[in-house]
């Protein structure tokens, strides 16, 4: 079964809004529902990394704290770069899954910025 975009979008919303217990529950549901492929492993590992980075939120060497989520142009630039890496045939499936998760995170972040109501939804 492919990774549910609804669950992933909800996970991103929860992680961004620092609702970690709910984000972890969604992450567990995603883990239970996906096939164990290299692409899915990379995607899931990126989701774990995003959650950990949001939790710590103070690592000066981490990518996530350096993002200005109010800068739509920056989010779009990062999304384009992640998509480029996700589509690159020089990367293994694991890496393409990893970059795909980050591209999806940028996509959801852009939507949350454009429509603040999206980030306040409480149900999946």
Image: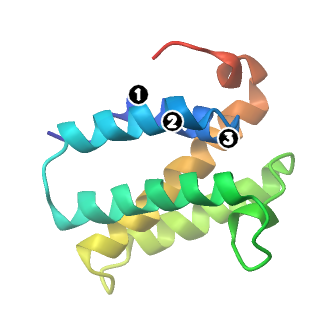
Q: Which label sits on residue 74?
A: none
Asked if labels 2 and 1 touch by Cβ distance under 8 angstroms, the answer is no
Q: Nearer the viewer, residue 23 or 10?
A: 23
Label 3 or label 2, whichever lies nearer to me, is 2
Q: Which mark is residue 6?
A: 1
Q: Residues within 10 Å of mark 2 (few under 14, many from 20)?
A: many
Residue at which label 2 appears: 23
Q: Earlier in the sequence, mark 3 or mark 2?
A: 3
Which residue occupies 69% across, 70% down?
63
Q: Position of residue 94 (x, y in %)?
A: 28, 72
Q: Residue 50 at x, y = what percent? A: 56, 56
Closest to the camera, between mark 1 and mark 3, is 3
The residue that mark 3 highlights is 16
Q: CA distance from mark 1 to mark 3?
A: 15 Å
Q: Residue at x 61, y 33 (%)?
A: 13
Q: Secondary structure at mark 3?
A: helix
Q: CA distance from mark 3 to mark 2?
A: 9 Å
Secondary structure beneath label 1: helix
Q: How is the image coloured?
A: rainbow
């Amino acid at each position: 079964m492919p990774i549910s975009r609804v669950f992933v979008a909800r996970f991103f919303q929860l992680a961004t809004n620092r609702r970690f217990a709910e984000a972890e529950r969604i992450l567990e549901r995603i883990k239970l529902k996906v096939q164990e492929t290299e692409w899915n492993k990379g995607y899931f590992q990126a989701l774990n990394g995003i959650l950990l980075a949001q939790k710590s939120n103070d690592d000066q060497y981490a990518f996530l704290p350096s993002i200005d989520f109010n800068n739509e142009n920056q989010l779009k630039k990062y999304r384009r770069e992640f998509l480029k890496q996700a589509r690159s045939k020089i990367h293994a499936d694991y890496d393409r899954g990893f970059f795909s998760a980050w591209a999806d995170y940028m996509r959801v972040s852009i939507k949350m910025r454009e429509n603040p109501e999206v980030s306040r939804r409480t149900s999946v």
